Structure formats: C-alpha cells, structure tokens
C-alpha cells in the first residue's frame, strides 16, 4: 500500500475514527481517574464516612473498595467489547477502502 | 480459649522441597524446549508473537503479582486491617489506563520495547539513550527490591542462608531467560500465576469454611477480637497531597513499567493485546480480593501477636495462616508458590532490562540500527548474563537494608520518565527530540532527587529529623515536571522531520498498517 498519509488522516472516515476512539478512551479514563481519586480524597478528608458500620462486620469502606476493584475490571471489559465490535469494524472498513482506491 | 500454635516455619519442609523440585523440573523442561524454538530476536524478545491473548493476560498477571504483593499485602491487612485494601486498589487502577491510552499504540507502533514507540519519528540516538536510562533505572530499583525481599523470605521460610538464596534465585532466573528467552519466561509466568491464584483461592476457601463461607462473618470475628478500627481506614492515607502523589505514581507507573509494556509484543494482534489487559485486570483484581480475605483470616485465626512476633512487617501472615488451616503440607505448598513467584518476577524484569541493553542501546545506538539477527541475539544473551550477575551482586550489597521504598521509586520513575514521553510521542505532533530528552531526564532526576530528600529516605533511612521535601512519593511533582519539560523542550527546538512523519505514525497508530 502506498498512499499519502496526510490525505488519509484528513479523510472524514479517519477523522471520525480518531474522534470516537479518543472520546471512548477519554470518558473511560476520566471515570477511572475520578472514582479512584474521589475514593482517595474521601479517605483523606472524611475517613469516618468509610469507617461507618453498615452492619455487624461490614464497614462502608469494604463494599466501596470492592466496587472500585470491580469497576476497574468492568471498564476494561466495556472497552474490549466496544473495540472488538465497533472500532475494529471501522478500522477494517478504512483499510478496505484504502486497498480498493 | 484459642490454642496457640507453634509454627514450623524456618525448618526444612519436605512438602515444600518436593513441590519446589517439581516446579524447577517442569520449568527447566519448558526452558529446554523453548531454547530449541528461540533463534531470532523476535523469538528471544517477544516469543515470536505467538502467545494468545488469554495466555498473555495470565503472564501479565504473573509479572505483576509479586511475592511482595502476596505476602506483603496479606501481612499489611492482618496487622492494619482495611488499609491494606487501599494499597491494593492503587496497584490495580493503572491497568484500565494501560488499556485506554497505551495498549494499542504501543502494539501498533513498536517492535520490542516502549522506546521503539518514543523513538518512532524522533532522532534515534538521543531518544534511545534517554529512554534506556529511564527503563533501566525502573528495572534496577524494582529488581533490587525483589532480590533483597526474596533473600530474606527464603531465609525466613526455609532457613537457607541469605547469600545462598540470592545466588540460587539469580542462577535459576539466568537459566530461564538466557536459554529460553521470552517463551520460557512467559510460561514460567503463566505457571506461577496459576499456582498463585489457585493457592490463594484454596487458602481463602479453607478460611471461609470456618465462617459458613461468608466473609462478613470473618470480618465480624475480626471486629470482635480487635475492635471496629480494623474495618475502618487508619493512618495510611492522611495527607491528601501525599495520597494524590502516591496515587499518580501507582496509576501511571503501571503504564510505564518496561517488563509489563514489552509483553504487548508477544501477542499476534491488537485484539489479543486488548484481551490480555482484560484478563490480567480481572485476575489481579480477584487476587487482591483474595489477599484481603487472607489477611483477615490470619488476623483472626493466627492472631496479630504471633504474626508481628515472627516478622514486624507481617510478611509471614499468609504462610502462618496456611499452616494454621492446612498443616505443614499446605504450608509447604504455599511456601513453594511464594518461591515460584519470586523467580517469575525477577525473570521478567531481567528480560526487560536485557532487551533494553541489547535492542535499544547496543543495536540502535552503538550500531546505528545495523546489526544482524545472530549478533543481536548474542548481545541480548550477554546482557542477560551481565544483568543477572548485577542483580545477584546488588542483592548481596543491599542485604539487611530497608529497600521497601525502591518499589515506590521504581513506580515514580516509570510514571515520570517513561509514561509522559510515551504519551506525548503518541499524541502530540510537535513533540520533538529535544522535548523527549528533556522530559525523560527531568522525570528521572526529579523522581530520584526528591525521593532522597523525602521523608521516605531522608528521615526513615538517613535518620534526619525533618525532610526537605514533604511528600513521601515524588510523582505529583516529578510527573508534572516531566510533562512541562517535554513541552518546553519541544518549543525550544522544533523537529521538522518528526512533525512531517506524524501523519504516517498516526495512520499506523490507528489502523495498525504502514502506508509508506
């Protein structure tokens, strides 16, 4: 394949691909950063809240901590699901059209 | 009244020796087999790209779950309770960031190391030299912490002298990497990850069996024995700036660890790379949940006095718990798993360091990119041998020293020297050679200098009354500094050639194919 890279990155399909990829990555990263640093800041400023007892043997901090762990995994799952489904399809479409032109 | 049990830790344990013998035999057999398949540089550095996404996920988890996180975090939980979980969470949240920002560009733009990506369109020599310094410093500090930890662990568990333990670990690790390259290292990681995950799961089942399979009953027993404080956050996070700085180091440091990043080249395509991050994140998260329960199990079933009596940091908690629930046979199994864990982690680090020395420094700097396959593989093997010997020597030199801070330092350098340069080179057209060098040098220097004058080293190790720099981890300043320096360098000296190559890089970054 010998194509002008400038022309490719200026094409609407490629621009749309970059914009979507970038917004998915940015949104998911911001959720992870927000939740984690939110957790840290609650620990720093309102420790008692996470130490409050929900029931015998269970403080609020334990389910919250587990939630952060499961969320981290869930977000990677969402990304994989999106990328395998939508992103790869868009990438393949652009590759196809480059091969044809 | 609960019974006080007498531990056999520190005495030779037949089961342990047996399990360990089996592990060494199996891994050496794999190494022999891998050696026959390891001929080219792609074989040595990246197992020929023939590892599946699921296998690589397990291997990534194997690379990341060190003996320190298994024994150390279980110990921290057993003595401090909830605080241990905060620590684990910090080590996990970097993985989604790798997935969202790094995995695909790394995979599409590089060949064997992250320096391939940083140097993709910049001047090879200065960028490779700078990136190698960041990479090697991360690997070395991490390696020292692992070697010293393994020497004391083996000494404590098996009663073997520290020096013999270090030399033994070094020799086995050199065998794996030298003869089997990435293929053998990957399988050692996979076997170790499976052993560690199953060992920890069995341990958790044996603990929960005594609490009607309900973790809340276990927590309630801990609460009854040691009070509400074990279920609540304690002193680990008190200063918000400290907490933010450590959080940044852990989050972005994970995305800058050379031995983790080079694993993305062992899979055939971007799809497999993604899958491997998903698998790794799941297993590592599951493992941290297990260590939390193991810590509480040890707190209740062994007791804090016995745990801290054996080791002040609580490192023996998981092993004591194994003995308390499953007797010496189970203790032997878990001890062998811990030993396997050490071997796997140091092998991964050594391979990453050797790859930097041969691929980045020797081939692309000293030989200007002109070296044939045989020559590069030979240099990589020599580098492995040298690095292995250096690791053993450093392990001996730092005997008895407090090296726990070195893991934090390795993460700080990874977050400050490796991550900003990697991210800027992928995303910013104007990022220039000068910018890359500025960014890496600033990040490394700030991370090292600031940690020396921080409370971690200046007060705790050098015994000065007050620290010059207030934060325990420098990442907040050093990582920000690296981004600013990268910007300043790129503005001072523009790189026309690099800017003109950016469209081609961008196409390859997104489409995974080269157009020129």
Image (spheres, coloured by chain):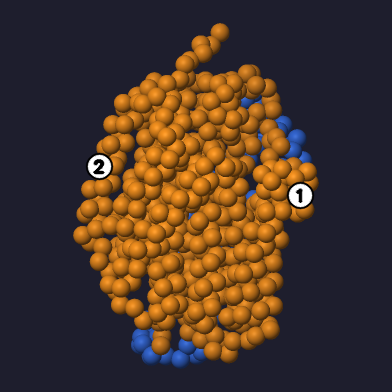
Residue A52, above or below B50: above
**Residue B248 on image: x %, y %:** 64, 56
Measuring 72% from the left and 53% from the top, which residue is drawn there? Answer: B453
Could you say whether the residue bearing mark 2 is in a helix, strand or loop?
A: helix
Q: Left or right: where does residue B264 sit relative to residue A43?
A: left
Measuring 31% from the left and 52% from the top, which residue is drawn there? Answer: B175
Say which quadrant the C terminus of chain B sits in.
Answer: bottom left
Q: Which chain is orange?
A: B
Q: Quadrant of residue B238?
A: top right
Q: Quadrant of residue B42?
A: bottom left
Marks 2 and 1 on same chain: yes
Q: Left or right: where does residue B24 sit relative to residue A39?
A: left
**Residue B17 on image: x %, y %:** 31, 31
Q: Colour of chain A?
A: blue
Q: Are marks 2 and 1 in contact (CB under 8 Å)?
A: no
Name the foreground residue: A28 vs B479.
B479
Question: For residue B467, which numbered disc appears in the image?
Answer: 1
Q: Residues within 10 Å of mark 2 (few under 14, many from 20)?
A: few
Name the foreground residue: B108 vs A32.
B108
| Earlier sequence position, callout 2 versus callout 1 | 2
Name the foreground residue: B122 vs B423.
B122
Cα–Cα span, label 2 and label 1 = 49 Å
Q: Left or right: where does residue A16 sit relative to residue B58?
A: right
- Which residue is labeled 2 in the image? B25
Could you say whether the residue bearing mark 1 is in a helix, strand or loop?
A: loop
**Residue B195 on image: x %, y %:** 36, 39
Please report, as a chain letter, where disc 1 is located.
B
């Amino acid at each position: 394949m010998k194509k002008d890279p400038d022309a490719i990155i200026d094409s609407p399909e490629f621009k749309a691909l970059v914009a979507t990829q970038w917004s998915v990555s940015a949104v998911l990263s911001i959720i992870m950063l927000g939740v984690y640093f939110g957790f840290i800041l609650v620990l720093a400023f309102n420790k008692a809240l996470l130490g409050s007892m929900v029931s015998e043997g269970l403080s609020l901090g334990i389910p919250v901590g587990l939630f952060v762990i499961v969320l981290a995994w869930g977000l990677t799952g969402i990304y994989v699901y999106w990328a395998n489904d939508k992103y790869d399809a868009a990438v393949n479409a652009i590759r196809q059209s480059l091969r044809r032109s | 009244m609960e019974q006080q049990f007498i531990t056999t830790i520190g005495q030779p344990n037949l089961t342990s020796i047996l399990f360990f013998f089996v592990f060494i035999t199996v891994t050496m057999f794999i190494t022999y087999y891998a050696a026959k398949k390891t001929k080219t540089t792609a074989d040595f550095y990246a197992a020929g790209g023939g590892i599946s996404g699921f296998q690589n996920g397990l291997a990534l988890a194997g690379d990341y779950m060190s003996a320190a996180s298994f024994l150390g975090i279980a110990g921290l939980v057993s003595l401090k309770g909830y605080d241990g979980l905060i620590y684990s969470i910090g080590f996990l949240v970097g993985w989604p960031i790798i997935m969202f920002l790094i995995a695909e560009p790394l995979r599409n733009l590089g060949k064997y190391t992250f320096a391939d990506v940083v140097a993709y369109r910049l001047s090879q020599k200065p960028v490779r030299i700078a990136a190698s310094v960041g990479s090697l410093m991360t690997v070395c500090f991490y390696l020292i912490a692992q070697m010293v930890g393994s020497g004391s662990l083996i000494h404590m568990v098996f009663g073997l002298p520290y020096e013999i333990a270090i030399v033994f670990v070094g020799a086995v690790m050199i065998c794996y990497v030298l003869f089997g390259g990435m293929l053998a290292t990957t399988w050692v990681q996979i076997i170790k990850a499976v052993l560690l995950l199953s060992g920890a799961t069995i341990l958790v089942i044996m603990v929960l069996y005594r609490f009607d399979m309900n973790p809340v009953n276990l927590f309630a027993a801990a609460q009854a024995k040691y009070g509400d404080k074990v279920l609540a956050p304690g002193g680990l996070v008190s200063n918000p700036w400290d907490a933010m700085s450590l959080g940044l180091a852990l989050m972005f440091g994970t995305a800058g660890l050379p031995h983790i990043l080079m694993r993305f080249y062992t899979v055939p395509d971007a799809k497999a790379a993604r899958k491997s991050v998903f698998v790794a994140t799941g297993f590592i998260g599951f493992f941290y949940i297990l260590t939390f329960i193991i810590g509480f199990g040890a707190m209740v079933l062994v007791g804090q006095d016995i745990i801290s009596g054996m080791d002040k940091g609580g490192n023996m908690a998981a092993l004591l718990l194994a003995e308390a629930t499953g007797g010496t046979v189970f203790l032997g199994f878990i001890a062998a798993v811990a030993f396997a864990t050490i071997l796997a982690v140091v092998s991964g680090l050594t391979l990453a360091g050797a790859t930097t020395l041969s691929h980045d420094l020797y081939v692309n700097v000293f030989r200007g990119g002109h070296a044939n396959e045989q020559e590069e593989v030979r240099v990589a093997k020599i580098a492995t041998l040298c690095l292995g010997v250096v690791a053993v020597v450093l392990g001996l030199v730092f005997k008895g020293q407090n090296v726990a801070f070195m893991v934090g330092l390795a993460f700080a350098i990874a977050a400050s020297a490796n991550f900003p340069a990697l991210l800027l080179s992928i995303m910013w057209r104007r990022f220039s050679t000068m910018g890359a060098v500025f960014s890496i040098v600033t990040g490394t220097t700030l991370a090292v200098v600031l940690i020396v004058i921080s409370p971690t080293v200046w007060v705790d190790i050098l015994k000065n009354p007050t620290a010059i720099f207030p934060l325990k981890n420098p990442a907040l300043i050093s990582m920000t500094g690296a981004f600013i320096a990268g910007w300043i360098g790129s503005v001072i000296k523009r790189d026309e050639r690099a800017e003109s190559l950016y469209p081609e890089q961008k196409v390859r970054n997104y489409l995974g194919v080269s157009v020129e």
